[in-house]
Image (cartoon, rainbow, N blue to C red):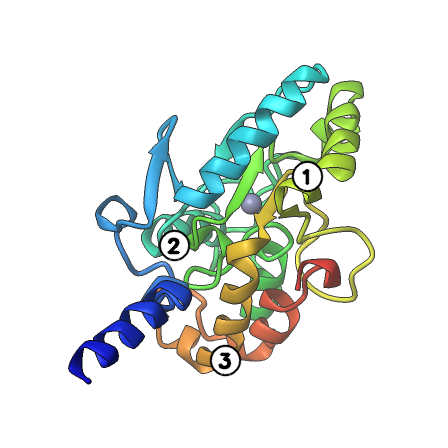
Amino acid sequence: MKLLILFVIAVFAVICPAQEEITKDYLMGKFQPWKDKRFTISGGNYLRKETLEAYQKMQAEARNSGVYLQIVSATRTFIEQKRLWENKWTARTPVNTDTGEFLPKPNTLKDTLTKEQRALRILEFTAMPSASRHHWGTDLDFNDVNPSYWSSMRGQKEYFWLVENAPKFGFCQVYSANRQTGYHEEKWHWSYLPIARNLTNEYQKQIIDSDITLTEFIGSETAITTRFIENYVLGINSDCK
Ligand SMILES: [Zn+2]
């Protein structure tokens, strides 16, 4: 009888491998990818092992069509995203890297923005720390993160190739054109759905706007007024949900 029970357990373990535990800290980028067994590193970028495998297959096929894909950003931790966000908030770096526009320095004479208006400008292209899909190791930025690059001949050819081919490899353009809410269109940002789809669902289940306001970064309170999770985290291309 004992043997039979052991046998049943063994068969069950093979058929249903342990479900990956998705913690709040992982979803919010509060972990160390270099210590996490699910992650690997490639060209200085950390990413989920399955994401890298799919990317490498896609990159090889693209190369055969004369399209050269390169990852310019993959996993970013909470701390890295906080640096990006706060540099834009405090006008240390441009709010728009393409045009070079800076927000007015907070609390100066030129500053006429409310906190919410300031957040909304940054949110055109940059996620709040603790809510970036880049925390997950499933989302990649290819070649160039400036919209103007993607209007060039080369950018258009690459984008056309991605639209035609990336879905075959599991990648989806989450910030597509024609959404009602969320970040501006990002032709460079592609998400590896076989993992990321579940993470979007888990984010929706486990995290609410007030969790974000409790994390430490400047302007975190605007997560409430911008209805951040509903409008941004879930404001993605419906094909990628
Ligand atoms: Zn991105």
Cβ atoms at labels 3 and 2 below 8 Å apart? no
Q: Residue at x 75, y 30 (%)?
A: 161
Query: If the image is split into quadrants, where does the C terminus sit?
Result: bottom right
**What is the spatial separation of the Cα atoms under label 1 and label 3, in whole angstroms?**
28 Å
Check disc 3 and report the residue beneath it.
Answer: 205
Tell me: is circle 1 under 8 Å from ligand 1.
Answer: no
Type of amino acid under label 3: Lys
Q: Residue at x 40, y 47 (%)?
A: 76
Q: Is the residue 121 above or below the residue 223 in the image? A: above
Numbered disc 3: secondary structure: helix
Quadrant of residue 101 in the image? top right
How packed mark 3 is, by other alpha carbons closer than 10 Å (few <14, some 14-19, many 20 or more), is few
Residue 223 horizontal/vertical position (percent): 52, 73
**What is the spatial separation of the Cα atoms under label 2 and label 1, in whole angstroms?**
30 Å
Check disc 2 and report the residue beneath it.
Answer: 82
How packed mark 1 is, by other alpha carbons closer than 10 Å (few <14, some 14-19, many 20 or more), is many
Type of amino acid under label 2: Lys
Tell me: is circle 2 under 8 Å from ligand 1.
Answer: no
Check disc 1 and report the residue beneath it.
Answer: 166
Q: Is residue 109 visible?
A: no
Q: With 15 as the anchor, is 241 left or right in this view?
A: right
Numbered disc 2: secondary structure: helix
Whichever of callouts 3 and 2 sits on the residue coming sooner in the sequence is: 2
Q: Nearer the viewer, residue 204 or 22?
A: 22
